[in-house]
Amino acid sequence: MKWALLLLAGVALPAVARTSDLPPAELVIHALDAQPNVEAANARVDAARAEADALRIGPHEIMATGTLSRRTVDPGDRYAEYDTTISRAFRLPGKAALDRRAGVLGVDIAQNQMEDTRHHAALVLGELWYDWLLAAELHRNAEGLVRNQETLVSATRKRLNARDVAQLDMRQTEAALALAQAQLGDAAAVRDRARTLLSVRFPDLPLPADPPSIAEPTVPEEGLPQLEALIVERSHEIGAASGQAERQTVLARRADADRIADPSLGVRLFSERGGEERGAGVYLSLPIGGGQRRALARQANAQANAAQSEVAAVQREIRGNAAADIAEYRAREDAWRASRDAVARAEQSAALAARGQQLGAIDLADRLYAERQANEARAQELAARATAARLILKLRIDSHTLWME
């Protein structure tokens, strides 16, 4: 609650919480757990546990059947008679163990699927978070450009009043200011949309009044190769697929065992001729399996084979995505460093152009062009920094080193 109040009030967080541009982990975890699809996945875990209990108990119940009738032998000779049977089917040896194993695996699968749902929710949150941060950075960059242009308009107006510049220069600076203000309006719209999407999709995550600046991307202490290995090792998607394959194998064995049907055993009581004849006996029923049971066994075995192939496909996909993300990050980091150097050079050029224009050494149009280049270079650097930061966040989420319990 303390974190929420601090964030909602826009109060500066302690230094330990400002080491990154991400929200506090405890707030993110709470927001993820409150997502409707995560709550639904948790409910499916409860359903899997109930199914496991049902499989452990078994499908067979005590059956009671009976008849009550009245017989007439001769006119006037009427007898009340009844017949009742109480029976129960029993699983043959080995079937109960397979059912219990299938139930346990079903719970494991549901838990892995719940964690995978939570994992995907974290990825969505990360994307929306950096959408907002980047939009806010671009808005701040646009604000800086507007301030520069306003200063230039004011200086040009003074020089025009002193007859030091032409009317054309005044019109050029005013046009540049109008374009900068239009860019600021667009940036504000994108920023407000990004914040709205984030707050609506994750209403339980309190947002600071002023979004933090995007931190420079840095490789986590685990290192990229270790992150790549952890992504595969800790993948809940692979865990769910592997559990499903094992469960299908168990169900295939269960279908093979079920080719011999479970027998029913019970007792029979009867009374005839008004109780003159009474008796008791043992009841035994054994269904004779036929072609349908063999077909169901073949179906279950084919599904088990398919599930094994799906595990290999999921493993390849996870490994491929992890390797691709690592490779892309290395390239994105290089691109960001290049764009950072471009900003330094463009800003130096803009400063020299401003000084030269003030001294009358260059035209106003050249100064405006240099300032536009500097503004575009800053925007490009922000976009490159955000892209690299997104990838690092994705790698940390996929490797379960951040936000994943």
Image: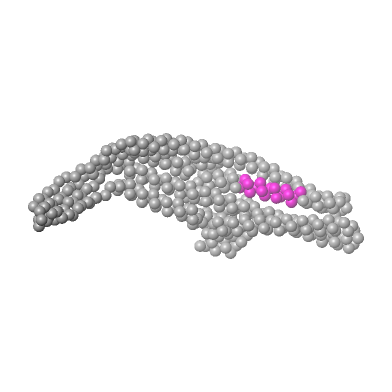
Visible in this render: residue 347? no
Coloration of the structure image: one colour
Total number of numbered discs in the rendering: 0
| Residue shown at 39% from the left, 51% from the top | 47
Q: Nearer the viewer, residue 85 or 179?
A: 85
Q: Nearer the viewer, residue 38 or 232?
A: 38
| Residue shown at 24% from the left, 40% from the top | 286
Left or right: residue 63 compared with residue 377: left
Question: Residue 89: image x %, image y %?
Answer: 25, 45
Quadrant housing residue 239 = top left
Left or right: residue 106 compared with residue 267: right
Q: Which residues are drawn in magenta?
A: 373-389
- Whether residue 359 is situated above or below residue 9 in the rendered picture: above
State the residue lying farthest toward the left.
Answer: 276
State the residue lying farthest toward the front.
Answer: 75
Question: Residue 403: image x %, image y %?
Answer: 51, 51
- Answer whether residue 381 is magenta in the image: yes
| Residue shown at 19% from the left, 53% from the top | 67
State the residue lying farthest toward the right.
Answer: 163
Visible in this render: residue 156? yes
| Residue shown at 83% from the left, 50% from the top | 366
Question: Residue 111: image x %, image y %?
Answer: 43, 48
- Whether residue 290 is situated above or below residue 61 in the rendered picture: above
- Answer whether residue 47 is magenta in the image: no
Q: Nearer the viewer, residue 256 or 207?
A: 256
Q: How would you classify the magenta stretch by its main secondary structure?
A: helix
- Whether residue 60 is situated above or below residue 139 in the rendered picture: above
Quadrant housing residue 358 = bottom right
